[in-house]
Image: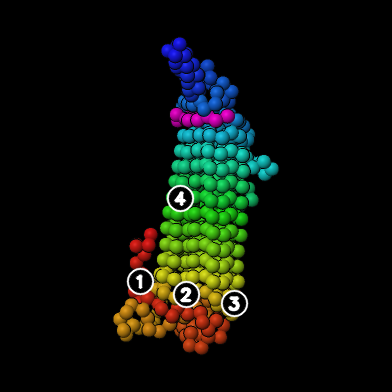
Amino acid sequence: MKTIFKNFLFLFLLIHGFCGMAKTITVSEKSSIKTIKKAIELAQKNDIIIVESGTYKEVDILIDKPLTIKANKAIIDGDNKGEIFVVKADDVTIEGFKIINVGTSYIKDYAAIRIRESQNFTIKNNIITDLFFGIYLEKSKNGRILNNKIYGKAKNEFNSGNGIQLWYSNNIEIKNNYVEKVRDGIYLEFSNYCTIDNNISKNNVRYGLHFMFSNHDTVTNCSYIKNGAGVAIMFSKFMTMTNNTFSHNWGAAAYGVLLKEVNDTQINCNIFENNTTAINIEGSNRVEYLHNDFISNGWAINSRGANYQNIINNNNFLNNSFDLLYQGQLNQNNFDGNYWSNYSGYDLDKDGIGDVPHRPIKLFSYVVNKTPESIIFLRSLFVDIIDFSEKVSPVFTPDNLVDSKPFIKQINHDNYK
């Protein structure tokens, strides 16, 4: 009796096990299943759909069950009529597609791939061109956006969308993506605990990366190059930015990083090179700036007011036009222990620390800030005289705004990366 029961149980599990196994459905122009929509209709949960090479003119492809959809050199042409993929299910993977000609709509914000109220998804190895929005997440979590390439044609921010956009989406990994020529390369709004790593965002109209009302996000090993502005962090807290490069963000209102109403944040071990303003700060408190390199910027740091209890230590300020612009008569920030390439003091006791405190502010920086055309006088003898007089007897800057322990030699940051 026991033997019969065991055999019956084995047979039951075997049958149901095989019935529960995922099957593979192939979409091809030469097969009976010629569209991705038809394949999704026929598929069961957790099936795999392989889309063979060819061009498929489809829009509004709804994925409402857990599926893996992979392309074998397949192109999806939206023909400028609407969205391409719309995901409304958990455990979905979209991989390897080239998506072109996403429709433009200022009401619906058409996207190449939209994830809506889903989790545990993976979007990887896709190429998206001729887009309005690229990858758009709404109220989703625990997903991955990996190794995608997004190429837009944006000329201004009013008729373009973002490359990767998150709205009320948490615990998202955005890694190894390339985004160019869209409005914002990557945009996060009300999105927390996200990891942004090893992305390149360049030539975008507005921001390479943009945060609004987002907390506990991490940005590492990324490059933000030739954007309208590099990264904007607004009304956010507990952010971390390390080992990133911000370069060649030039323009009247351009900067490497903007912080507005940002608190309890770390900006460490980054390179800011050839930006109009490397860091622009307003209303931000308890922010830590350690082991950064500021190289050949217009302004290295522009503190626009209401910034308190910030720490600016162990940074290299190298050949910037102005190392610091500070607006306000009260300084509650710490600027000690940096290297300043224009420091003119000495080190008689040979301990590597200058014996004379360094005042990093040039009075002429205030003049240029108010009247940009006056920059043509930067190297004149008159400017050198007024800058020297402000250092000797401060009138326009807080008396305690000094680096009391300036390094004599450039700081090596290799051990802190």
- Residue at the disc numbered 1: 410
- Amino acid identity at mark 1: Gln
Asked whether 169 or 329 is in front, the reply is: 169
Asked whether 130 or 411 is in front, the reply is: 411
Report how far apart the C-alphas of labels 1 and 4 lie in the structure: 28 Å
- Residue at the disc numbered 4: 197
Label 4 crowd (10 A; few <14 / some 14-19 / many >=20): many
Asked whether 6 or 394 is in front, the reply is: 6
Looking at the image, which residue sits at the far front? 1
Residue 71 within the segment the image draws in magenta: yes
Report how far apart the C-alphas of labels 1 and 2 lie in the structure: 16 Å
Between disc 3 and disc 4, whose residue precedes?
4
Label 1 crowd (10 A; few <14 / some 14-19 / many >=20): some
Magenta segment: 65-74
Between disc 2 and disc 3, whose residue precedes?
3
Dot 1 falls on a residue whose secondary structure is loop
- Residue at the disc numbered 2: 335
8 left or right, relative to 83: left
Between disc 3 and disc 1, whose residue precedes?
3
Report how far apart the C-alphas of labels 3 and 4 lie in the structure: 36 Å
- Residue at the disc numbered 3: 328
